[in-house]
Image (spheres, rainbow, N blue to C red):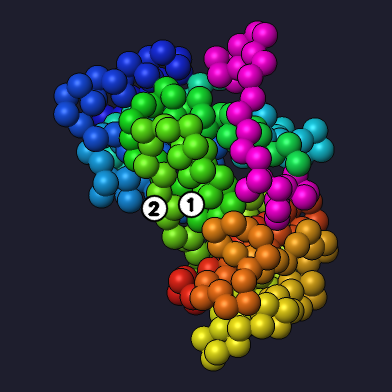
Amino acid sequence: MTTVLRKPAEFRQVCDDARANSHRVGLVPTMGALHEGHFSLIDEAKKRADFIAATLFVNPLQFAPDEDLDRYPRTLESDLAGCSQRGVDVVFAPEPDSMYPAHFQTQVSVSELTKPLEGGFRPAHFDGVTTVVAKLFNLTGPCTAMFGRKDYQQWKILSRLAHDLDMPIEVVGCPIVRESDGLALSSRNRYLSASERERALSIVSGLRRAHDAWAEGDRSVETLRTLAAERVRAEFDAVDYVSVVDPDTLLTPAESANRLLIAVAAHLGTTRLIDNVVLGEDPRP
């Protein structure tokens, strides 16, 4: 049976006790509204650890005032049921006041990896992410932590966070889980109308065009970017970026690069979607 905890100290104690009993802790941090993408992280954690902890916390620090904090889906009961069915040992579902009590004033930042891509459009976002995840890593202690590669930049930033601060955390990036037509699973997909849902597939179509060109030997960064961007710009209401960057630095790639990250962020109505593919590494979306 899955144990549900609300207080940080209780969660820390449970994780400490698990290690004291010779268990390897697997951590799956989420904001809830769980779908098969999240459950795939739990499944991967079970391959790497034998005590599984999931967190359900809609983190206010990573939302700008004009973003969707208030309407972000909160489905605690179904999330807990899914965690129980997937064999999660403990769920940590704190209230904001317990994570950020009165007079809280500490921020954890990663400097360079946060600047490109999302950093140009959500400048305070990653400071909120790194602060809450640093807290979760600190509470959990030594563990293997799972993150989905749909949020590719986030995974890279959190890997850097753990490395730079000598945290005893193995940060694992897990493959994107897609629906049968290729759309990346996201909690925000439920915001889409039927027509928007159809138009959203242009992201996948664009990434596939670039992937196919790469497979045929095209290494032109501008050509690959254009192939992806044309489809997205034709269907989305606004496009934040369609970028081709080095998968490790997230900066301009070398001309001889044997891997390239194509990352997309775009809007349909009030819904913002992201997706990506690493050419030379990932299968066709």
Task: Tell whether label 2 touches label 1 (CB within 8 Å).
Answer: yes
**99 part of magenta stretch:** yes
Residue 285 at what x, y percent from top left? 52, 73
Disc 1 from disc 2: Cα separation: 9 Å
Residue 40: assigned label: 2
Which residue shows up at 78% across the image and 49% down it?
Answer: 121
Q: Is residue 76 left or right of residue 235?
A: left
The kind of residue tagged 2 is Ser
Q: Residue furthest top?
A: 102
* Image side of residue 155 versus residue 117, left or right: left
Region of the chain picked out in magenta, as a range: 96-122
37 up-or-down from 197: above or below: above
> Between residues 257 and 155, which one lies in front from this camera angle?
257
Q: Earlier in the sequence, mark 1 or mark 2?
A: 2
Residue at 47% of width from left, 71% of height from top?
282
**Numbered badge on residue 267:** none
Q: Is residue 84 left or right of residue 135?
A: left
